[in-house]
Amino acid sequence: MAIDEGELVASYRRVERPLYNALYRMLWDAQECQDMIHDAYLRLWDRRDRVDSERVDALAWTAALNLARNRLRWRKLRGWPAAPDTLEGVADTEDPEAEAEQANLHAALRRLPVRMLQVVLMAEFSGMAAREIGEVLGIPEGTVASRRHQAVKRLKQWLGEH
């Protein structure tokens, strides 16, 4: 039942990039995303005697998403903006049209409720099936599908306005 260092490192290598991509679209802060991923894996390491090796990836996602949700809640309570208003320094392009598209996507993602945002980001970046996403988030598979459908519908509507 316990995991060893090698299993944790292997999980980190599998999960780090898609988890970072999902967290970044929740928090829009690269350093916070990296910190949360590391904190999630530190928590897993601290509990390594109770962690099943087959669930390491899912537990890493759960811990990191919980940390991100807490950070968003913390920002809201303190009156901090949920995300930067602009994407200055984020876009890797000189194309103003591509930058405008990224800014529109950024604004649309910020409008989604956190529960929908988590589902759509996990569906796009994790490579997990709806059943696995449901296990990570603690919701039924049907709820995953419903939230994803509603999130995509809203995003299409909002992005269609631009």
Image: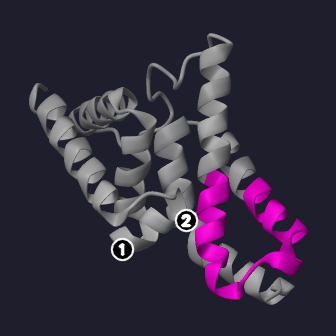
Looking at the image, what colour scheme do you see? Answer: one colour
In this picture, is 76 found above or below 131? Answer: above
Which is in the foreground here, disc 1 or disc 2? 1
Along the line of sight, the residue nearer the viewer: 28 or 51: 51
Q: Secondary structure at mark 1?
A: loop
Name which residue lies at 55% across and 17% down. 81
Residue found 24% across the figure and 52% down from its top: 146
**Considering only vertical position in the picture, is 29 above or below 141?**
above
Q: Is residue 55 magenta?
A: yes
Q: Nearer the viewer, residue 104 or 140?
A: 140
| Quarter of the image where one finds residue 9 | bottom right
- Let me know if residue 31 appears in the view: yes
Q: Earlier in the sequence, mark 1 or mark 2?
A: 2
Identify the disc placed on residue 9. Answer: none
- Total count of labels: 2
In the rendered structure, which segment of residues is drawn in magenta? 38-64
Residue 32, given in percent of the width and then of the height, sits at 68, 41
Instruction: Specify few, some or many for label 2: CA neighbours under 10 Å numbering under 14, 14-19, or 20 or more.
Output: some
Considering the whole magenta stretch, tell me its main secondary structure. helix
Q: Amino acid at mark 1?
A: Ala
In space, the residues marked 1 and 2 are separated at their CA atoms by 17 Å
Circle 2: element type: helix
Q: In the image, is 24 to the left or to the right of 42?
A: left
Q: Residue at x 52, y 26 (%)?
A: 83
Residue that carries the numbered disc 1 in the rendered image = 129
Whether residue 128 is visible:
no
Q: Quadrant of residue 14?
A: bottom right
Q: Is residue 1 found left or right of 162 in the rendered image?
A: right
In depth, the one of 6 and 97 nearer the eye is: 6
| Kind of residue indicated by mark 2 | Arg
State the residue position of label 2: 17
Q: Where is the C terminus found, in terms of image quarters?
A: top left
